[in-house]
Image: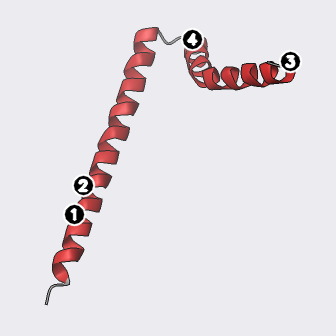
Amino acid sequence: MSKEELMHAATVEAAKGAPPIVVATGAQVQGWSSADLIAVLTIIYLVLQILWLLWRWHKAAKADGNSTEVQG
């Protein structure tokens, strides 16, 4: 592996790890504990999962409704 390839790989891996580090560091600066951070992230995750499920159900219901209306 050349020096350029090694630097590129290191940069890519550092970029992949940056978001969790930024969130954790920002929470510590604001005085949040790890438990608070985990609770907030869990709530965000649950809300996103609920919204995705509702969207999927809506999409499936809409598709089923369109296929039954065309019969005639």
* Above or below: residue 12 compared with residue 35: below
Q: Which badge, 3 or 2, comes first in the chain's sequence?
A: 3
- For the residues labelled 4 and 2, the Cα–Cα distance comes to 38 Å
Around disc 1, counting alpha carbons within 10 Å, would you say few (fewer than 14), some (14 to 19), or many (20 or more)?
few
Residue identified by numbered label 4: 28
Q: Secondary structure at mark 3?
A: helix
- For the residues labelled 3 and 2, the Cα–Cα distance comes to 50 Å
Image side of residue 66 versus residue 45, left or right: left
- For the residues labelled 1 and 2, the Cα–Cα distance comes to 6 Å
**Hey, what amino acid is under mark 2?**
Trp
* Residue 25 image offset from top left, x and y in percent: 61, 14
* Above or below: residue 14 compared with residue 48: above
* Camera-nearest residue between 57 and 72: 72
**Hey, what amino acid is under mark 4?**
Gln
Write down the quadrant of residue 28 in the picture.
top right
Residue drawn 20% across the image and 68% down it: 64
- For the residues labelled 3 and 4, the Cα–Cα distance comes to 36 Å
Q: Which badge, 3 or 4, comes first in the chain's sequence?
A: 3
Residue drawn 32% across the image and 54% down it: 55
**Hey, what amino acid is under mark 3?**
Lys
The image's mark for residue 57 is 2
Q: Secondary structure at mark 4?
A: helix
Instruction: Pick out the residue farthest to the right.
Output: 3
Instruction: Pick out the residue farthest to the front.
Output: 1
Q: Secondary structure at mark 2?
A: helix
Around disc 3, counting alpha carbons within 10 Å, would you say few (fewer than 14), some (14 to 19), or many (20 or more)?
few
**Hey, what amino acid is under mark 1?**
Ala
* Camera-nearest residue between 41 and 55: 55
Q: Are marks 1 and 2 in contact (CB under 8 Å)?
A: yes
